[in-house]
Amino acid sequence: MGNDMNKIFFDISDILLYSKSNKTLTGIQRFITQVIAHLVKRHGSDRIKLIAYHPRKKRLVCYEASYFLRESDFDRSHFLHHFGLRKHSLIPLKLASYVEDKYGVQKNDLQSIRLLLKNFLTGGREFRRRGIVLTMPERPAMSANAEAQLAPGDVVFIGGATWMSLSFYEELKRVRRVSGVYVCHYVHDVIPIVAPQYCAGAFPERFERWLRVIVGQSDYLLTNSGASAGDLKRWLFDNGFSRDVGIVRLAHQFANKSRDYMVLKGIRDRVRNDARVPYALCVGTLESRKNIWTLANIWMQVHAQLGVATPRLIFAGKLGALREDFEDFIRGTGSLYGYIRIVESPSDDELAYLYRNCLFSVYPSYIEGWGLPIGECLWFGRPVICSSTSSMPEVGGDLADYIDPKCPESILEAVLKMITDVDYRERRAAQISRACLRSWTDVADDLWCALSKVASAGASYENPIRC
């Protein structure tokens, strides 16, 4: 890209904060890790750097980006250790990972200490019984003492959910004034503004305050779809901001997995058991915006028509807000007699396994910024039913079957057709398998192109820049 841009500094403040209480990555964090990895491969760690706001030091600190070249999936314990965020560094990483898999994130420290004591008292038998093997001593955690050295022509790219720490922007404002760097924000959606009914508490108000701050602290705005760009442009116009918005669309590719990826190692027994019978799949955070209560009721109607021929419906995702009606349904029907199962916070391998082996996936969300699960299911060659609203047709193109998320009859008709018309379902699968789908390399290249043009043109809004 020439010398128009010296370095890209990817802000990872969001991932560092998120990983403290979450074991698996969701869409925003997946986007950041994938584009960093592909840009480092293409342009080297000399030009791709990581920064984060250090809440105790009150400044931006710098890290090397080569960590994200690891081929293995996200390992929270290893990630926290690498970036110096573990509370108890004396707990071995292998033990911490084992405890998280078995007991969850919240009980990590307590259970780890309990097992360490029990293993000591049994002369090592406890670890041997559980198959916990401690390997060579771990590398020391990465130091966060190095203050970010930014120079004119560098670009700071902020692609995460940074609305939790507005103090970050005070430091960013100082850095921009001193160093003369360009700042680009990637806005994944403005759903809290255009559809606040799907957000809990005062989040819509907090989100809009954050959006006003980032517009004032950005030289350029990017987003992930034409639908999101349209929503953002309308908000900017209505609030008196003169800004152009660029688009870098996300990928169909699932993480770093090939389209024929298949592995059994690391799949929890519970997941294998849930997927042992024919099933449809719904991936995403379990929240009201995803229309999960309606889908659960649709499945009850499917069962009323098909009886024992009804495939299982598996919901896979982390627990979200405003899901009480869905949980009432699950409790009241006994998980629809076992025809509905929930896989909470699946790993990447588990998600790939579920995508690869499902009959089809159904994604009746009311509104999305992009809709990663649509593309991910297509990546593994399985048919998709999804909503015809917002960005979702941009992801599914002519490969998905579309429904009206506010019309239960529309969803029921599409689901019944996909279940009962086996020839149609497999014709769709064959069509999808032949399709050319978008990879994370494509996303990274488009982002590099956009950021390079921002730097070379001086980020002038009077001369809008599009890649």
Image (tube, rainbow, N blue to C red):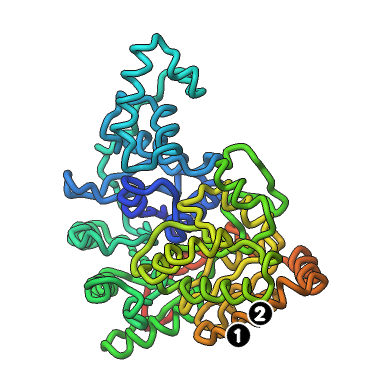
Height in image: 87 above or below 293?
Answer: above
Residue at disc 2, secondary structure? helix
* Residue found 71% across the figure and 71% down from its top: 419
Residue count near mark 1 (Cα–Cα under 10 Å), binned few <14, some 14–19, many ≥20 = some
Q: Where is residue 341 in the image (x, y as percent from the top left)?
A: 53, 57
Question: Tag count in the figure?
Answer: 2
Q: In the rendered structure, which amino acid carries the disc numbered 2?
A: Ala
Q: Position of residue 204 (x, y in %)?
A: 27, 75
* Residue found 49% across the figure and 17% down from its top: 128
Q: Nearer the viewer, residue 314 or 364?
A: 314
* Residue found 32% across the figure and 47% down from its top: 21
User: In the rendered image, which residue does mark 2 sit on?
Assistant: 414
Q: Determine contact: label 1, label 2, CB under 8 Å.
A: yes
User: From this viewpoint, is residue 467 visible?
Assistant: no
* Residue found 53% across the figure and 65% down from its top: 336
Tell me the number on the disc at residue 410. Answer: 1
Height in image: 140 above or below 329?
Answer: above
Q: In the rendered structure, which amino acid carries the disc numbered 1?
A: Ser
Q: Which of 186 and 291 is in front in this view?
A: 291
User: From this viewpoint, is residue 408 visible?
Assistant: yes
